[in-house]
Image: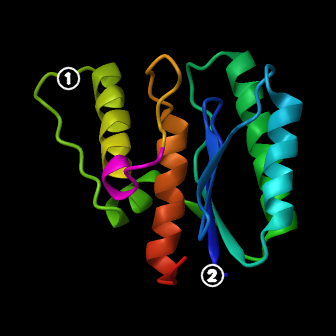
Amino acid sequence: MGRSYVGIDPGTQGAFCFLDSNGVHFCDTPSNKNLHASMRQAYKWFSEMSSFCVGIEDVHSMGGMSAKSNFQFGRNLGFVETLAHLSSPTVEYVQPKVWQKACGIEFIYSKGMSPAQKSVLRKQTVAATAQLIYPDVELYGARGGLKDGRADALMIAHFLRLKYGRPI
């Protein structure tokens, strides 16, 4: 079995992506609704892997977020970091611009776009690129909404795959 790659978007709507010779597997980051199930699933996958590296998106809380959102974000990041550092000798923090550039993702903004419109465009562009590279991966929920944390996590795992140049 080849090396495996774990990409993590630690945000409140984030995800873990496990990329290995068996395919692509996702686990959403913990929330109040799925806290125990998500933690158990992520721990199970980490414990079953033998040779892998972990990439965590290098993000931080932002001004303007509610205290509740910042608290949940911090909780997720702490869980992600603890699990990653206990499970893998190779853990790196990757800035979004770094993994996006390495994966060939470019954003073209129209003049006058609002920050919210730019955010939607970024999420759609990352998802479109992920679907081109991994066409069988499900990045949309049951009602058709984009699970952008999954797209980001997949592209972070893909970035690690490109960086370390080892086939899965």
The CA span between labels 2 and 1 is 43 Å
Instruction: Say which of 164 and 42 sits in front.
Output: 42
Residue drawn at x 34%, y 27% as measured from the top left: 120
53 relative to 162 in the view: left or right: right
- Write down the quadrant of residue 56 in the picture: bottom right
62 relative to 51 in the view: left or right: left
Circle 2 residues within 10 Å: few <14, some 14–19, many ≥20: few
* Amino acid bearing label 2: Gly
Q: Position of residue 146 (x, y in %)?
A: 44, 28
Residue numbers of the magenta segment: 131-137
Q: Which residue is mark 2?
A: 2
Q: Which residue is mark 1?
A: 113
90 relative to 127 in the view: left or right: right
Magenta stretch encompasses residue 135: yes
Tag 2, which secondary structure? loop
Q: Quadrant of the C terminus?
A: bottom right
Circle 1 residues within 10 Å: few <14, some 14–19, many ≥20: few
* Amino acid bearing label 1: Met
- Write down the quadrant of residue 76 in the picture: top right
Q: Position of residue 65 (x, y in %)?
A: 60, 20
Eye-nearest disc, 2 or 1:
2
Instruction: Say which of 61 and 117 sits in front.
Output: 117
Q: Position of residue 49 (x, y in %)?
A: 78, 69
Q: Position of residue 66 (x, y in %)?
A: 66, 15
